[in-house]
Image (tube, rainbow, N blue to C red):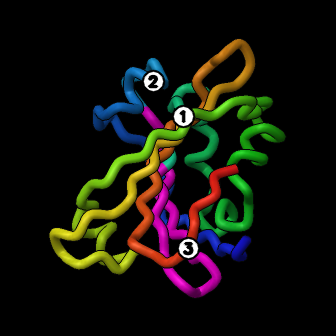
Amino acid sequence: LLPHYIEVVSVEETDEQGPWTSFLQSSSAIRVRRKVDISHQFMTYSIVYLDALRFRPLLDLSPEFLSQKNLRIFLHERYNAPTLRAVHRFTHSEPPADIASVIGSAPGEAALMVSALGYGYRETPISYQQIYVPQAEYELEII
């Protein structure tokens, strides 16, 4: 496994609607945008959506502080919100231009898009994550 380095770009509340809305069963979400450097070989981009009511205190934390944390473990320890099960869905899609520039995809080029749905106790939705992965010569392992 290659080492990875996470930089949290932003933490914000959003009422933007998407597939995370029905999954989280919330009209408002905390959106955490992250750049993930995979062993200085290539970049991926991750957007994590969390229920805004439950995780509102995240808005008070700096991106620099969250960059030092494994978000899954942090949510478990700080909010008693462990991810006990995850479902991963894979598709190819053209990433938005701002994400494509970060991961090094050419305009019009498809990237792998992974939707990761995280469940906690009693199948309670914890997180909805979109991960954009550029074409690369490596296998992807999701743990």
- Left or right: residue 96 versus residue 111 is left
Checking the image for residue 117, the label placed there is 1
Q: Nearer the viewer, residue 136 or 29?
A: 136
- Tell me the amino acid under the disc marked 2: Phe
Q: Earlier in the sequence, mark 2 or mark 1?
A: 2
- Would you say residue 30 is visible in this rendering? no
Write the residue at 48% across / 68% down.
44
Q: Pointers 2 and 1 in contact (CB under 8 A)?
A: yes
- Outermost residue on the top side: it is 122
Magenta span: 29-47
**Circle 3 residue:** 138
Q: Main secondary structure of the magenta part?
A: strand
Name the secondary structure under disc 3: loop
Which residue extends farthest left? 108
In the image, residue 112 lies at what x, y percent?
A: 39, 58
Q: Nearer the viewer, mark 1 or mark 3?
A: 3
Would residue 15 be counted in the magenta stretch? no
Q: Which tag, 1 or 3, sits closer to the chain's start?
A: 1
Residue under the point 57% across and 62% down: 140
| Residue type indicated by callout 3 | Tyr
Question: In the rendered view, would you say 20 is above or below 12?
Answer: above
Residue holding disc 2: 23
- Location of residue 16 (image quadrant): top left
Which numbered disc, 2 or 1, marks the residue closer to the eye?
Answer: 1
Q: Is residue 81 above or below residue 37?
A: above
Secondary structure beneath dot 1 equals: strand
